[in-house]
Image (cartoon, rainbow, N blue to C red):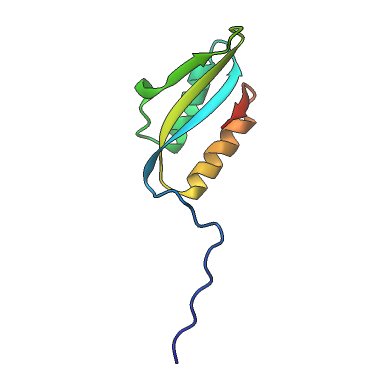
Amino acid sequence: MTAPTPPRDTRDSLIEYPSLFPIKVMGAKVDGFVHAVTHIARQFDPAFDASRVELRESKGGNYLGVTITVTATSREQLDELYRTLTTHPMVKVVL
């Protein structure tokens, strides 16, 4: 008799870990916004390279898009990073 096959995790990811993973964070263009985003990125990726941050102003100049690239090591890490970013008071949208 063969051993039963363990149930397959329905949350299997298409992402191979570890991998570089870009995240776009948008918020008002105010002092401290970029620092807040990069500070959070470092909490989840100690090797985070702030020199790779990309900035893009909105057409009217009121908002700023910040693209960070983190080394994703697990689904749980990414989920918690997204949760932390979206709950920050300076952040409007995370993609």
Q: Residue at x 53, y 63 (%)?
A: 9
Specify whether 47 is left or right of 3.
Answer: left
Q: Where the C terminus falls, by quadrant?
A: top right
Residue 14 in the image, given as x and y percentages of width and height: 46, 51
Q: Quadrant of the N terminus?
A: bottom left
Q: Using the image, determine if residue 41 lies above or below residue 11.
A: above
5 to 49, vertically: above or below: below
Residue 51 location (% of width, % of height)? 35, 21
Q: Position of residue 91 (x, y in %)?
A: 61, 24
Q: Which residue is outermost to the front?
A: 59
Q: What residue is shown at x 48% (from left), y 77% (from top)?
A: 5
The structure residue drawn at horizontal position 37% and vertical position 42%, both measured from the top left corner, is 19
Considering depth in this image, is 49 or 24 the residue closer to the camera? 24
| Position above or below: 70 against 30 | below
Q: Is residue 61 left or right of residue 49?
A: right
**Looking at this rendering, what residue extends furthest in the top direction?**
60
Q: How many marks?
A: 0
**Residue 52 falls in image quadrant:** top left
**Residue at x 58%, y 9% (from the top left corner):** 59
- Whole-percent x, y for residue 7 in the image: 53, 71
